[in-house]
Amino acid sequence: MAIRWVAGFVLVVFTGLILTSPPVRGQLTPDYYESCPYLESTVKSIVESAVDNETRLAASLLRLHFHDCFVDGCDGSVLLDDTDTFTGEKNALPNANSIRGFQVIDDIKSALEEIEGCQGVVSCADILTIAARDAVVKAGGPTWTVELGRYDSLTASKENAEAFLPSPFSDVPTLNTKFADVGLNETDLVTLSGGHTFGKAQCGGFSFRLYNFSGTGAPDPTINSTYLSILQESCPDGGDASVLNDLDQGTPNAFDNSYFSNLVINKGLLRSDQVLESTDGSSTQDLVSAFANDQSTFFSQFVISMLKMSAISPKNESQGEIRTNCHFVNSAPSPTSLLVATA
Ligand code: HEM
C-alpha cells in the first residue's frame, strides 16, 4: 500500500483500489472563531468529562452530528424542540428514544456563553461538529482539523428526518441512494458506517434478523452462529425491543477497525452493517476488507469522509442564525435560561 499526499488531500492506493475525495470547504474554515480562542479547549474538556462519566456518550455525540448533517445539512436542526409552528426531528422515527447527548451540547453552549468573545457567537451546529471529533478522539480514533462557520437553522423537519436518515433494514443500493442524496459516495458509506465501532443499538433495530428473516422462518444466514445465540438471548422473540446491545462486540467502547473485522466473520449487528460485506459482488466488500486489514487506512479515510459529511449544506448568515439556546430558534418564546431547557 502506498499513501501519498496530493494537494492537501489524501490519496490512498492499495491493490488497485483508490480511496479519495477532497473535503468540500465552501464557506467553512478552521479559523472561523478568532474572537473565541478557548472554543476548542472548552468543547474538548466538556466532552472528555462527559465521556469519563458515561463512556457511551462518545458514540452518542458522533451519531448526533451525523443525524444533524443528513437532514437539511449540518445546521443544528436536530437539536430543536418541537414548537407550535413545526414538529422537529427529535421525534422522527430514527431519532425518538434513540438519539442522545443533548445535555453535553447544552453544557458546552452554556460554558461558551460565559466566556468573553464567545457569547452569542458560536453556532450549535459547529459545537456538534467539534464535539463529534473530540468524541472520536476520546475513544481512541483519529483526530483532524475541524472546519467551522455553520449557521443554525431556523426550523427543523420530522418529515425530512424520516425521509433522509438511512434505515438499519436497508440493502446496499438503498444505503448508497441515501448517501448520494446528501452528496456522499459509496466509500463514504462504508467508511462512516465504521462509526458503529462503538455505541449501542436496541433489539428493535435488528431482531427481525434473528428469527424470521424476510419471511423465511429462519434467521438471517449471514449471522455467525455463535453471535446469533448471543443476540437471541439478549433479544428474545417478541421481547423488549429497547434492550441495548453493543454495536461492536469485540471492543465496544473503542474507536478502532474491529467493526470491519466483525463484518468479515459475519458479526455485524445491523443488517445495514452486514450487507456491506455479505452482498456478493458488491464493491463495498473490497473496502470492508481493506479497513479490516489495516486500521490506519480506515482512520485516514474516516477523516476525509467526516470532513465531507460535516460540510453538507452549511447555512450562511442569511439562511440561519447563531442560536442562544440550542433547543429553540432565537425568535421563539423560549425559556430565559439555558438551565431550564429540557435535556
Ligand atoms: C449507514 C447507515 C446507517 C444506519 C442504517 C444506522 C443505523 C443505526 C441504528 C439503528 C443505531 C442504533 C440506534 C438505537 O437502537 O437506538 C445506530 C447507532 C449508532 N450509529 Fe448509526 N447508522 C448508520 C450510519 C452511521 C454513521 C454514518 C455514523 C457516524 C459516522 C453512525 C454512528 C452511530 C453510532 C456512534 C451509534 C451508537 C450511538 C449510541 O450508542 O448512542 N451511524 N445507527
Image (cartoon, rainbow, N blue to C red):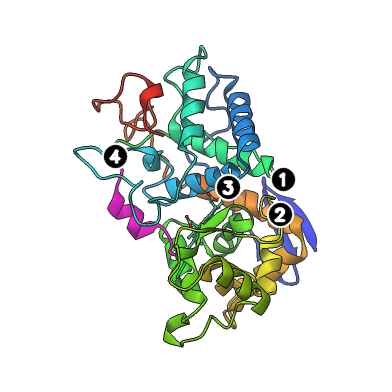
Residue labelled 3 has its Cβ within 8 Å of some atom of ligand 1: yes
Q: Secondary structure at mark 3?
A: helix
Q: Position of residue 155 (x, y in %)?
A: 29, 39
* Circle nearer the viewer, 4 or 2: 2
Q: Position of residue 290 (x, y in %)?
A: 72, 67
Please name the residue that numbered disc 1 is placed on: 140
Q: Residue at x 46, y 88 (%)?
A: 216
Kindly indicate the quadrant of the structure image that contains residue 180. bottom left
Please name the residue that numbered disc 4 is placed on: 155
The amino acid type of the residue labelled 1 equals Gly
Q: Are marks 3 and 4 in contact (CB under 8 Å)?
A: no
Magenta segment range? 156-167
Which is nearer the N-term, disc 2 or disc 3? 3
Which is nearer the N-term, disc 4 or disc 2? 4
Q: Residue at x 59, y 24 (%)?
A: 42
Whether the magenta-drawn stretch holds residue 159 is answered as: yes
